[in-house]
Image (tube, grey):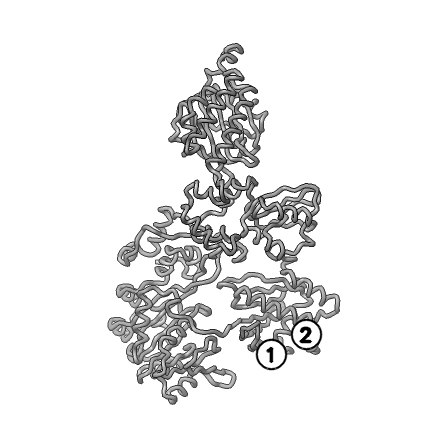
Amino acid sequence: MLNTEARQSARPSEGEFREGIREIYAQLKKEASMQAGLQSCEDALLKLLDARLFTVYERVANGKELRAVFRGGDASGDEAAEIKVPFSATSIAGYVALSQEAILVRDVNDTEEVADIHPRLQFDRRFSDARGLEIRSMCAVPIKDEILLGALQLMNFSQDREFDEIDLKRSEVVGQLFAQQFRASLAGSHGPYDHLVQRGLISQEDLAEASRSTETDPSFMASVLMETHGLDADAIGRSLELHYRVPYMPFEEGLTLPDSLIANISREYLRRNLWVPVSGDKQQAIVLIADPSNQQKIMEIQGLLNARSYVFRVGLPEHIRMFLREPRKNGTPAGFQELFTVLGSAGNAVKLEQAVVDESENDAPGMVQIVNRMIAEADRLSASDIHIEPGRDGMAGAVRIRVDGLCRTLLEIPEEHCAAAIARVKVISRLNIAERRLPQDGKCKLQLGDRKIEMRVATLPTVHGESVVMRLLTSGSPMELENLNLSAQNQAQIMTIAAQPHGLFLVVGPTGSGKTTTLHAVLSKLNAPEKKIWTAEDPVEITQDGLQQVQVQPKIDFTFAKAMRAFLRADPDVILIGEMRDQETANIAIEASLTGHLVLSTLHTNSAPETITRLLDLGLDAINFSDALLGVLAQRLLRTFCAHCKRAYIPDEMEKKRLIESYGVKAFKSHGLDEQGWAMYRAVGCGECGGTGYKGRMAIHEMLPCSSKLREMIYRRASLDEIRKQAVVEGMRTMRQDGIQKIIAGHSDYSQLLQVVGVAVD
């Protein structure tokens, strides 16, 4: 160790230091980038700070890590990109970023000295040991300008002098200088998103295009950048932070807004003005705002909240809207709770026994409103079903809805009102409210705004009371075949089948898989004045001009089979049978297809090849069936990403390998698929999708045209395995393969595919 006199003489004087700072500042200003400036000033900085090594770190976009952008001294600057340290006490630079305080360590090998700074503080030796460096003394200071931008770390070797308090203060001066240059080099000086261009995350042209597309409402700029250009929310937040010089705050699931600040402010007002108090009280309010530079809005906030002091954070407009979602109280959406309270206070709670004898009480205005709102809310969320489920042992019941194929809880319904709600549903469905021992089926028609909805109702007795399931059926027009997300091959094969004058075409899959939608899309192609088309459905969900559509009525013995016999006497060209439920209907359909009619129908089977063996097992004549069958289309509905929050990423080789192996390596190559250019996304979750990351569904298909070889196999009643192998040989792409193609195209992910097709079993 050098003596005190030697240390003082080795260090520049105060005047030399000030002059050196001015020269370095001037040099940094000349350079086009911070990296180039540091490189040109490397030697001068080392001399000015009397240090052997220095590292400059930049805070990365996620805000929880530092990345080395330059190393000066004995280590090469090219190695800087390899170094990342988290905000934690596991390293000195990480601790400085975490605490945002400058620290001096005279000897990093002195465990007591290091522990005095923080009990868990450690000196990360990985990089020094890898290069054979004996680091002893260190100074580390934050690079900050209102917000943390990075960190500066100085190092000396064991044979050099120790750093002291003077060195620490001089390091802070250099840190402030670097903060200015970070601002000039990295921050967007003209707009809140310019930093994204500086970082190379988006081109200037794309940014300008996104800006033009949101001229009418700039608050959706971040949404466009995420959806169209696949940018990360944290990266956008970092850009906002640098521009406004206000810390960025991302969305936090589960955060409760402070009642003392938000109680008397309309959420709609907050959504319109894009700010929300996220924490604090009347002493200090912490406010998240989309534009912290809007002084007029700041004054409005101060006038409304009337707090003693304010702390502002910048946030994405999408995140602010997510914070302002309607809260739930005891599992019940806002609005329902008030109605339940009114019912309770008015003595309108209906016991199970009372519901039997006094129907008028079930129609109390409060309960009417609750059921009406329940149905309207389910429709707003695009639910297909509503489930009212009783609780057990006096506990609250639940109302669940099925959205995109999955159930979610809509609200909890107090035990004393559960029976009344079920009774109300039975009344409007014209069911017997006194009958609670047997299942019942009913239906009713509703008017929601300008839309008509048919609701099918099924009640079932459980050990805890009656349970009700309501299916919402919206009458509508048919979809275009081109909009069903069919592959080019499958669509061409369906069009070939639809052009046939006679034969049987089946669409198969579980309940709610879109079979009727597909068949009506095919019918829309066939619907022409020269063709007479009859349909028998239960219920009639989709209507088309030019079709003769019949509603079957099993209660009066008007079945699919009887409808078919009637159609054959009504001069049809094309017949649609809603479902082949039994052997009788199937036989009549085959008979019709063999006598000059094109017959379309559905069946509940798991795959296209399985459909053939299933119908043969029903007892159909194999010869007639093989002659009649044109093809089978199997389908499922796959949940798709929410367009508002999906996040693009580049899949690694392991993920690609898993998808290719699941598809079939040989088939992947033979089908002409490319291992490059995959548009992969991740589910994130936002207010638009209820935090799930998914919104909407698309069909995946398995198309099996009936070839001469397959007809021969049907005739001799070949096994399911034989039929499946032959179908694949003839070019059938399985639902799994179709789903993987749609994953590669960026519509969904593998986890959702597994939910509908399961794990492959050899």
Amino acid of disc 1: Leu
Going from the N terminus, do you reach mark 2 or mark 1 first?
A: 2
Q: Position of residue 207 (x, y in %)?
A: 44, 48
Other-residue count near label 2 (Cα within 10 Å), few / some / many at <14 / 14–19 / ≥20: many
Residue, x 70% and y 42% (percent of image)? 308
Give the answer, above or below, for where 253 lies relative to 397.
above
Residue in front for this viewpoint, 391 or 684: 684
Foreground of the two, 32 or 425: 32
Q: Position of residue 443 (x, y in %)?
A: 55, 77
Kindly identify which numbered label has been placed on residue 519: none
Q: Determine whether the residue tagged by mark 1 lies in a helix, strand or loop.
A: loop
Residue 147 appears in the figure? yes
Q: Specify the label residue 362 is tagged with.
A: 2
| Relative to 618, residue 327 above or below | above
Which quadrant would residue 39 be assigned to in this image? top left
Please name the amino acid that badge 2 sits on: Asn
Separation of residues labelled 2 and 1 (CA atoms): 14 Å
Q: Is residue 446 left or right of residue 567?
A: right
**Residue receiving disc 1:** 431
Tell me if I can see residue 392 in this picture: no
Query: Of all residues shown, which one is farthest toward the bottom?
Result: 569
